[in-house]
Image (tube, rainbow, N blue to C red):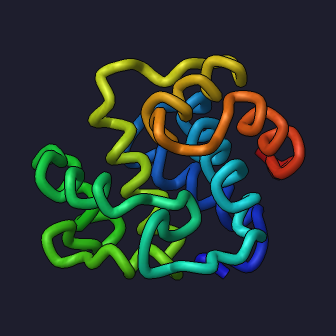
Amino acid sequence: MYGIEHSNEAVLMTKKVVSIFGGGHKTVMMILGICCVETDMGTYPDKHPEKWGVGLTQFDEIAFEDLQKRARGRHRKMLKRFFGYDLNTVKFTDLADDAMLALCLTRMKLLLIPEPIPTTLEAQARYWKEYWNTKAGKGRVEHYMSDVARFMPKVV
């Protein structure tokens, strides 16, 4: 499901993505936290993989289209060089079963946010709510924190 068989795969993939695009441990934890809250670290079945949030991090179509328009040239080149994806030809539905693509695009989206990724869990929960789940989304800061505690792999 979502292109992974075990949560440890998501950890390894996320570390690879962050090693290429930068950000360090706090960024690894932020991306994995998004995986925890959005898909229970890939264990919650996606009932609508063609719309709303798609893939391991539940990327939404508006954010996908925005990323295709605004991604920096150097990040597009890194995506192509290190992962083999061309942001101009990737389709939104490709995210449904391609965890590496979902993680790469999640990192690239986070790179467009002017506010730096925070280091504490509570601050990351607020960051997720403001920039990922948005004000219209149902998720709450407390929900993020409890899902991270529940689903975060022990190998991080």
Left or right side of 33 for 44 = right
Please tell me in which quadrant of the rendered image residue 26 appears: top right
Percent of width and height locating residue 62: 29, 56
Q: Quadrant of the C terminus?
A: top right
Q: Residue at x 76, y 38 (%)?
A: 143
Taking the image as drawn, is residue 153 in sight? yes
Q: Residue at x 25, y 76 (%)?
A: 90
Taking the image as drawn, is residue 3 in sight? no
Q: Nearer the viewer, residue 83 or 124?
A: 124
> Number of callouts in the render?
0
As drawn, 76 above or below 99: above
Percent of width and height locating residue 39: 68, 61
Please tell me in which quadrant of the rendered image residue 126 appears: top right
Percent of width and height locating residue 69: 12, 53
Left or right side of 30 for 11 = right
Q: Residue at x 17, y 78 (%)?
A: 89
Q: Residue at x 78, y 41 (%)?
A: 148
Left or right side of 40 for 19 = left
As drawn, 113 above or below 35: above
As drawn, 144 above or below 34: above
Percent of width and height locating residue 28: 59, 40
Q: Quadrant of the N terminus?
A: bottom right
Please tell me in which quadrant of the rendered image residue 40 appears: bottom right
